[in-house]
Structures are given as structure tokens and as C-alpha cells.
Image: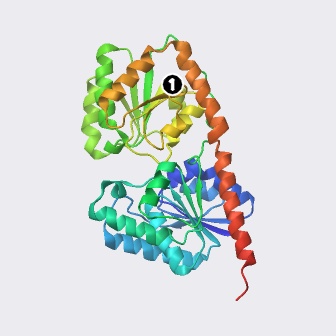
Amino acid sequence: MKILILANSDVGLYRFRKELLQKLLEETHTVFIALPEGGMVDKLIQMGCVFVRTEIDRRGTNPVKDLILLKRYIHVIRTISPDVVLTYTIKPNIYGGMACRILKKKYMANITGLGSALEKGGIISAISVFLYRLALKEASCLFFQNTANRDNMHVFRIRGKREILIPGSGVNTAEYTFEPYPDQAEPVEFLFIGRIMKEKGIEELVAAAKRVKKKHPDVRFQVAGECEEDYQNLLETAQRKGILTYLGFRDDVHALIRECSALVLPSYHEGMSNVLLEASSSGRPVLASRIPGCMETVEEGVTGLCFEAGSAESLTEAFFTFIGLSYEEKKEMGIRARRKMEQEFDRTIVIQTYLQEIRRIREEKNDEPIS
């Protein structure tokens, strides 16, 4: 079979879905990837994928650019003539879905989140709902990462022919191996990994860290990730005052997790947080917002702690609670977190679900009468 994957990032595709790509290639499928040029493209090509450069304005709302993207997808799909198309993230889901409908191609969409446009309301939200309905109506299958996103889509009367709940991208437990907990003599170190932006709760993180440092000056806060321009000054000021250390963008995620006492994610909304899965798989407790996409990965008080999204006060209390735990309690949280990942979130679970759906589509295609 010829399988085409539409995505907006080579990094995300390689980091979270390379095992799926490997499995598809092992099963002798021809795998095409249509996405923007990036640093991981060469690795994807080396795996055996066929790269089709497809630029996307990921965060823009310019309708002309979006129409150009739709036209580009139509050209790519018509040229390749894939047996099935897999789409990831909002714009590939919408415009890739539309292109597949126009060309009558089988496609499966992955709903990793609702997107800020849908959640804010107003005219942009109304347009987004209309586009989603148009794009996803004929999808062979919709994959959801949490029940809240699925239920919210239903509120907007957006449904697929089939809907399957999967544990996000899952986590490669063989790659994110269990790591011994840091030595008891080491100070508590909290780690944030993610894009430095408002929606990831960076303002609350800095405010809470400032309060914690006043009472526990030895506690460390490490922040890693690409920083949006609006928050460069906030991080530089916080670092200058000794509140946190900004590490910049890092791709050695496992090494960073190994050194921390706990990972923190004060995000406002998530599909299913990969970094929480990776930290838990590595045997680290997690502190996460009490929101869909985070709560599924955390057993509160067992594998980590939760707090209210958008509340620096609630986050501060979670920090104090964790700091107050004994060394053995922190260590045991990490052990239980690893166990949860092995039992519920191993990436092989996700891969098998995709493969089953692809086989189903192939069988349906074989059963179709020859025109």
C-alpha cells in the first residue's frame, strides 16, 4: 500500500511516530511524508520515507495561505494517489481532509487537541467548526487522545464514521528507560520542557518559582524549550534574579529528565502530553495541570500531583506539597509512574491500533467492486 502522512512538523513526526513509520516500512508499505523542511527530515528519509516538501503557516489565519495549502495538498494527493492518508494536527486535519474528500481518498485524522481558535469562541471559532465538519465528515476513522476532546467535538456536531480513543502517541518505554532517582543529598530540582508560551503556563511557573525560592532557596527550577519572543524578557529577568535556569531548546530530553526530581507542566490545554509520558516512563513524578490530556497520565498522589491550570497559587501549593514529601515517597512516586506507563501507555498499543485500521481499510478496498 501507498501511505501518505500529512503533518506540520518533522520533529514531532520523528520524535513521537518514528516507531509507527518503521513498522509501516517493515510491512513493505511505501510511506510518503508531506511536511515542511526541517532538521529531522534527513533522518526520516534515511528510514525509508519519501519526503514531499509542503510548507505550512502553522499558527496563521490568513485564508489565502490556507487555500494555497489546500491546493498543494490536492496536488500532492493526486500525484501520489495513496491508498490511505493519515493526518496529524489541525491544518493537515482540515485541509488534508478536504483534499481527500475532493479526490475521494481514504483518510484517518488524529485529533491531538481542539486548538485555541475553537476554544476561544467568536467568528474564528464558528469558521473553525464549519471547516472541521467539512473536513472530517468522510474520515474513515478519527483518533482521539482524550475523552474530553472527543466529547467537545460532539458538542460542535463534529463526528467521524469511526472514533477510537488512543493514549496519545504513547511512549517508547525502551527508549525512555527507567532511571534511578537522584541522590538524596541533591537539592530538589523541578524541570519544565516545552514551548515557552502563555498556553504552557510559563507566567504561572515563573510566579510560583519565585514564591518557592523565597522559602526554599536551594530548590532548583530548570526550563528547556523554544522561547516565543514575547517571553524572552520574562525568562532573562527570572534567570538574572536566580529564580530559574533557562537551558534553551534541547533535544536531549531523556538526559534532562534523568537529572530532575520531578517534571512540571502547567499547561492550559493538551491533547495528551508527550513530555509527561516521557518523564513518567523515566521514573520521575510529574506535577501537571488538572486538565484533560494531563490528568489521564497522572494518578494524583500516586504517580504525581495535580493543580489548577492558570493558577500560580495552586501551582505553588503543589510545589510545597512535593518538597514536603520524604525522599522515599518521591522515589516511590517515580517507580509507580513507570509502572503506569508500561501498563497503559506503551507506544506499541498505539501502533497496533493504527495497523488494525490500515488493514481494515485495505480489506474494504479489496472488497470494492472493480468499476
Please determine whether, in this image, residue 252 is positioned above or below residue 125.
above
Please determine whether, in this image, residue 119 is positioned above or below residue 270.
below
Residue nearest the observer in this picture, 325 or 220? 325
Whether residue 307 sits left or right of residue 277 in the image: it is left
Neighbour tally class for label 1: few under 14, some 14-19, many 20 plus, Cα within 10 Å: few
| Rendering coords of residue 215 (x, y %) | 31, 14
Q: Quadrant of residue 248?
A: top left
| Rendering coords of residue 107 (x, y %) | 58, 69
Residue plotted at (60% across, 45% down): 170
Whether residue 184 sits left or right of residue 354 in the image: it is left
Q: Quadrant of the N terminus?
A: bottom right
Whether residue 355 sits left or right of residue 109 in the image: it is right
Q: Tell me the amino acid under the disc marked 1.
A: Gly
Residue plotted at (59% across, 31% down): 282
Residue ID for mark 1? 301
Residue plotted at (51% across, 37% down): 276
Q: Residue furthest top?
A: 185
| Rendering coords of residue 231 (x, y %) | 28, 41
Residue nearest the observer in this picture, 259 or 136? 136
Query: Does the rendering let one see residue 126?
Result: yes
Whether residue 210 sits left or right of residue 102 in the image: it is left
